Image: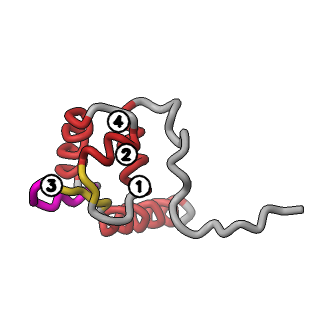
Amino acid sequence: MPDTASTDGPPSFEDQFSEDDVELRIYGTILQTREPTTASAIAERAECDPKTARKYLSWFGELGIVIRHDGHPATYERNNAYFEWRRINQLVATDKGTQ
């Protein structure tokens, strides 16, 4: 019988990125994060050092992938506008390739 469990929302964090390098684990964790989250919490989910997470989160912020919210501690969230822009660019590129 098919699995009828709801597929709404982000996938589980359980071993989702265990085979990936730390950059991809942090990136994947950001993709699943739906609200501002501390670097320490992201590091815990990505199974890396918080200092490493902060380094990558800073870089992702420069790229526009995440939004950094100042505070104590600072929090980070996925920048949905970036992913919408990226998807539109992919669709335009695909459309140009079919003409």
How busy is the neighbourhood of tag 1: few (under 14 within 10 Å), some, or many (20 plus)?
A: some
Residue type for callout 1 = Leu
Q: Earlier in the sequence, mark 1 or mark 3?
A: 1
Rendered image quadrant of residue 43: top left
How busy is the neighbourhood of tag 2: few (under 14 within 10 Å), some, or many (20 plus)?
A: many
Q: Is there a contact, CB below 8 Å, between mark 2 and mark 1? A: yes
Q: Is there a contact, CB below 8 Å, between mark 4 and mark 3? A: no
State the residue lying farthest toward the left. 71
Q: Is there a contact, CB below 8 Å, between mark 1 and mark 3? A: no
How busy is the neighbourhood of tag 4: few (under 14 within 10 Å), some, or many (20 plus)?
A: some
Q: Earlier in the sequence, mark 4 or mark 3?
A: 4
Classify the position of the C terminus by image quarter. bottom right
Disc number at residue 23?
4
Q: Which residue is mark 2?
A: 27
On the image, the x and y values in percent for residue 49 come to 28, 32
Q: CA distance from mark 1 to mark 3?
A: 18 Å
Q: Residue at horizontal 24%, vertical 56%?
A: 76
Q: Residue at horizontal 26%, vertical 56%?
A: 66
Q: Which residue is mark 3?
A: 74
Q: Residue at horizontal 51%, vertical 33%?
A: 18
Which stretch appears magenta?
66-72
Q: CA distance from mark 2 to mark 4?
A: 6 Å
Secondary element type, mark 3: loop
Disc number at residue 31?
1
Q: Earlier in the sequence, mark 3 or mark 2?
A: 2
Q: CA distance from mark 2 to mark 1?
A: 6 Å
Q: Is there a contact, CB below 8 Å, between mark 2 and mark 4? A: yes
| 87 part of magenta stretch | no
Q: CA distance from mark 3 to mark 2?
A: 17 Å
